[in-house]
Amino acid sequence: MTWQLQEAKQRFSEVLRRAHDDGPQIVTRHGEEVAVVIDISEYRHLTGAARDFKEFLTSGPDFDALELERDREPARFVDLS
């Protein structure tokens, strides 16, 4: 369903209910589509399950499995004079 902005503001609870029951609700301003209201479950499905920051950091690659070797030569000298 499409809602004019002023009507959507006045009937916001109904817009939310319809987004939950009937699907996405489009909001227009001066006849132009400017926003869409969707149910939170649909939003989460579209964006994927959000992980917290700690989970994000710990989900990275296992660096212990990498074979990294540091060059044992001393760092080069840079003459700044």
Image (spheres, helix red, strand yellow):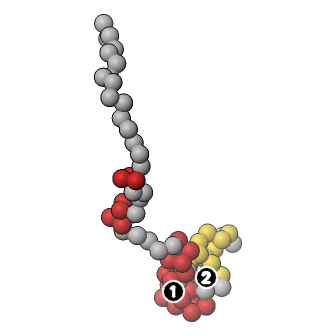
Query: Badge 2 is on which residue?
Result: 24
Q: Which mark is residue 30?
A: none
Please tell me which residue lies in front, 23 or 8: 23
In the depicted view, which residue is nearer to us: 68 or 14? 68
Q: Looking at this view, is 8 or 49 the one in front?
A: 49
User: Is residue 28 found left or right of 61 in the rendered image?
Assistant: right
19 to the left or right of 55: right
Amino acid at pointer 1? Leu
Decide: is 70 above or below 49: above
The amino acid pointed to by label 2 is: Pro
Q: Residues within 10 Å of mark 1 (few under 14, many from 20)?
A: some
Secondary structure at badge 2 equals loop
Q: Earlier in the sequence, mark 2 or mark 1?
A: 1
**Residue 25 occupies which quadrant of the picture?**
bottom right
Secondary structure of residue under mark 1: helix
Q: In which quadrant of the rendered view does residue 20 lie? A: bottom right
Instruction: Locate residue 81, reporting x and y percent.
Output: 30, 6
Instruction: List x then y, in percent, for residue 60.
Output: 41, 59
Q: Which residue is mark 1?
A: 16
Image position, residue 76 (x, y; %): 34, 18
